[in-house]
Amino acid sequence: MRLTGILVSIALLTGCGGGPMGMGGGGDFAKQMEEMQRQSMAGQESMFAKQKLMQDLMNSPDIQAWHNQRDQMALAVGDRQFDKSFDVVFDAMTVALASLGCRVQNMERVSGYITASIPELPPEQLQSLQHEATRQYALAKGYPPNILDSKGPMDDMFDVEGATNMMSRGMSGLTLSMVKQSPEQTKVKLRFDNVYYPGLVSEYYKVVWASVDKQMFLDKALD
């Protein structure tokens, strides 16, 4: 292989084995070459595995266990009822989304329907959640536990988590549906589209509802 030939040339030029230009210490030289070849093969195998993992994520980013968890989460925290008028709740929702960096794509006051981009999370928190999501996905698909570990320069060519982040940000969003149940009571249904990892969905629920509650409190103080 071309890579192996390059490694051999480097080894000879740097005098591996303890002698000048590779002279002497033949046993050590052979061991070093064997180790270099082993590392090279491990890096290539890891690179191909990461490439396949990335393709799996792009073609089928969800797994059944996540789907089930998200369904349970939607029932538990996805719906909320506010003892406020429809207009008050609608206004609080729009301001809360803006404060989270969500870009509103569609907003209909009559129907109580809002679509927007997902909230912004702190970079370190988002990176940690994405790493855990990729790790869980890989294990569920039968990949080795250390699939995300770096094994060499060639292996680092495939940034699985970075690609997953770009894909997620481009396709994900949220939907808010508001229903007037009485003059002073409004029900809100919050759902996240194309966000598959339950840990990430949970954080999005937390930040959106916390922002809404904060805005409700501020609005009440102004009344």
Image (spheres, rainbow, N blue to C red):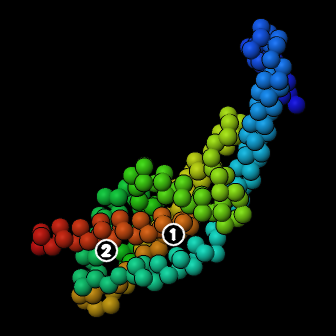
Seen in the picture, residue 165 relative to 210 is either above or below; the reply is: above
- Residue 6 visible in the current orientation: no
Tell me the number on the disc at residue 198.
Answer: 1
Seen in the picture, residue 88 relative to 10 is either above or below; the reply is: below
Disc 1 element:
helix
Task: Inspect the image, locate mark 2, and give the three-letter code of the amino acid beneath it.
Answer: Phe
Q: Of residues 107 and 168, which is closer to you in this image?
A: 168
Task: Inspect the image, locate mark 1, and give the three-letter code of the amino acid beneath it.
Answer: Pro
Q: Of residues 60 and 39, which is closer to you in this image?
A: 39
Q: Which residue is mark 2?
A: 90
Q: Of residues 221 and 162, which is closer to you in this image?
A: 162
- Where residue 139 sits: x, y (%)? 66, 63
Determine whether, in the image, residue 5 is placed left or right of residue 140: right
Residue furthest right in the image: 1
Query: In what quadrant of the picture does the N terminus appear?
Result: top right
Asked where in the image residue 35 lies, by quadrant, the reply is top right
- Residue 42 visible in the current orientation: yes
Seen in the picture, residue 50 relative to 183 is either above or below; the reply is: above
- Where residue 42 sits: x, y (%)? 75, 42
Give the residue drawn at x 70%, y 57%. Answer: 144
How many marks do you count on the picture? 2
